[in-house]
């Protein structure tokens, strides 16, 4: 195909097949999301290798998330100032180099510095990739393109724990970072070859960098992430530092909103929230972030902490979620341009809610295949959520505002995920304490049932531990079972609350304004 014919057939991508563009921008996004999931599995091994406590090792995640959250909404300014393709390449290269230093880190301080650089590089990958992809297809074909993109987004956190557990157990936690290097190199080659800047980016007039807006953004996102990660350890508002951090968060957030609204040419333009569909999408992506990250984080923990599975085995058990996503993404891509996306969203959220309610029926007797069907259906349902949500949210956004909109959209998803994980973790700990107290009330020394059970267990243990240790050992086993039961009930509560949240999302999906059947592209779209 000659150059003229190629440009005629694919005008939006300057002659490049848009599916090549899709594959090119999927690679760095998949790499970034996968890395986040893999690193969480390797934390205990990182702590042991670098002579750090588990609490100190969590800063490996926190430092990345803070840098990531700061760069996300600022990515649009950098893309306009330096060119979107050039900035994307810079981010991929920075992420890849930082991954090497993370894997080679000899101390905790070095890996934290490398993770900050990695977060700065990874923060812009998702909004840049998403805006490039959305502009590479006509509006009527965006559902299919977002289905392919969404497959990568949903699959990465699903296979991440399994892959991370295998790499860590088989080789070393360092390979959880080294694996990014070949993927990053391939992404650089493909982006260099197939991705081009649109004319409005090449000729964009960009104002001065908003130092004040960037500083306020860094303060409130940093405070939010630190409070969410460390608040539970110090009893939240019971700690003075938490109260001061929340005060700084609120002040910085209010000032940032005021500056971003009053200064449209600043780092972030919040006037895009005037669009009803985008505003609704921001609400739903925040709630979706809470739902999906709660499930991704809590379900493997249930298998590990309650049932005693290894990280790798737990990853294998939840892995079928990826199969569901793989099956659902092409289907929703086909239906997206033929069915009201609000119906698809409702179906997806309702399916997710039903699966979460099923997770809330677990007990201590379940095996690795007990939840196979609902876990698989969760991935299938999520594919019906992500694609229509991204399509509906950005459908009426002009191309010139796409980078600004996707940066804000992705930031809210990350914030929702952080809030969801913090709420779920706190709920599991505190509800477990509550259930432990309630269950203990029924185990009084005068209880005939307790005496009968402990005597039977002591008789068994007496043959192995001796008469002196049998009685204390019996009570120890009973207490351990009580703790296990209390923790299980706490997890059940979290699963059920997640289901209720998904039902709220299903209802909120109808807040979207349905676009005309033959909608014209907004002013500025090409």
Image: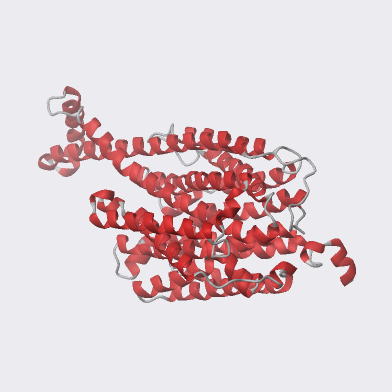
The quadrant of the image that shows the N terminus is bottom right
Q: Is residue 58 visible?
A: yes
Choose between 508 and 313: the one closer to the eye: 508
Q: Is residue 169 visible?
A: no
Picture quadrant where residue 230 is located:
bottom left
**In the visual, does 228 lie left or right of 79?**
left
Residue at screen point 52% across, 52% down: 413
| Residue 72 coordinates in the image, percent (x, y) | 53, 62
The quadrant of the image that shows the C terminus is bottom right
Picture quadrant where residue 201 is located:
bottom right
Outermost residue toward the front in this view: 262
Counting labels gives 0
Choose between 64 and 285: the one closer to the eye: 285
Picture quadrant where residue 475 is located:
top left
Choose between 345 and 27: the one closer to the eye: 345
| Residue 174 coordinates in the image, percent (x, y) | 44, 70
Residue at screen point 66% across, 51% down: 394
**In the visual, does 260 lie left or right of 274?**
left
């Amino acid at each position: 195909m000659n150059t003229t014919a190629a440009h005629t057939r694919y005008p939006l991508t300057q002659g490049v097949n848009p599916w090549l563009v899709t594959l090119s921008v999927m690679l760095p996004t998949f790499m970034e999301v996968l890395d986040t999931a893999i690193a969480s599995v390797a934390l205990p091994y990182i702590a042991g290798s670098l002579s750090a406590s588990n609490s100190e090792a969590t800063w490996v995640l926190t430092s990345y998330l803070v840098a990531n959250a700061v760069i996300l909404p600022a990515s649009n300014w950098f893309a306009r100032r330096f060119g979107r393709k050039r900035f994307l390449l810079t981010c991929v290269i920075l992420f890849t180099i930082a991954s090497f230093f993370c894997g080679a880190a000899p101390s905790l301080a070095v890996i934290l510095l490398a993770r900050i650089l990695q977060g700065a590089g990874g923060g812009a990958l998702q909004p840049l990739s998403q805006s490039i992809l959305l502009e590479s297809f006509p509006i009527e074909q965006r559902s299919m393109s977002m289905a392919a993109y969404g497959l990568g987004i949903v699959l990465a956190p699903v296979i991440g724990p399994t892959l991370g557990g295998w790499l860590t157990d088989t080789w070393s936690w360092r390979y959880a970072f080294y694996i990014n290097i070949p993927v990053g190199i391939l992404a650089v080659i493909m982006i260099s070859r197939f991705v081009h800047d649109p004319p409005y980016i090449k000729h964009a007039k960009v104002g001065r960098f908003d130092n004040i807006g960037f500083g306020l953004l860094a303060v409130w996102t940093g405070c939010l992430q630190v409070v969410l990660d460390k608040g539970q350890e110090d009893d939240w508002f019971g700690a003075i530092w938490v109260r001061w951090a929340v005060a700084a968060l609120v002040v910085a957030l209010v000032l940032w909103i005021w500056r971003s609204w009053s200064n449209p040419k600043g780092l972030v333009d919040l006037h895009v929230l005037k669009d009803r569909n985008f505003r609704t999408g921001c609400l739903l992506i925040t709630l979706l972030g809470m739902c999906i990250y709660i499930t991704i984080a809590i379900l493997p923990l249930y298998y590990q902490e309650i049932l005693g599975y290894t990280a790798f085995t737990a990853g294998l058990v939840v892995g079928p979620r990826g199969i569901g996503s793989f099956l659902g993404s092409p289907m929703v891509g086909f239906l997206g341009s033929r069915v009201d996306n609000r119906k698809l969203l409702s179906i997806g959220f309702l399916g997710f809610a039903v699966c979460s309610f099923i997770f809330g029926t677990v007990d201590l007797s379940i095996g690795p295949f007990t939840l196979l069907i609902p876990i698989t259906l969760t991935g299938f349902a999520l594919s019906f959520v992500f694609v229509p949500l991204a399509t509906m949210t950005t459908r009426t956004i002009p191309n010139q505002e796409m980078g600004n909109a996707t940066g804000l959209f992705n930031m809210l998803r990350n914030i929702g995920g952080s809030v969801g994980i913090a709420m779920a973790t706190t709920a599991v700990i505190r509800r477990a304490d509550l259930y432990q107290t309630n269950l203990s009330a029924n185990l009084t020394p005068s209880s005939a049932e307790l005496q009968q059970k402990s005597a039977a267990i002591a008789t068994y243990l007496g043959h192995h531990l001796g008469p002196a240790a049998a009685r204390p050992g019996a009570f120890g086993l009973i207490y351990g079972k009580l703790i296990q039961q209390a923790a299980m009930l706490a997890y059940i509560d979290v699963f059920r609350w997640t289901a209720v949240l998904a039902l709220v999302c299903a209802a909120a999906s109808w807040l979207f304004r349905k676009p005309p059947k033959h909608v014209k592209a907004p002013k500025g779209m090409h």
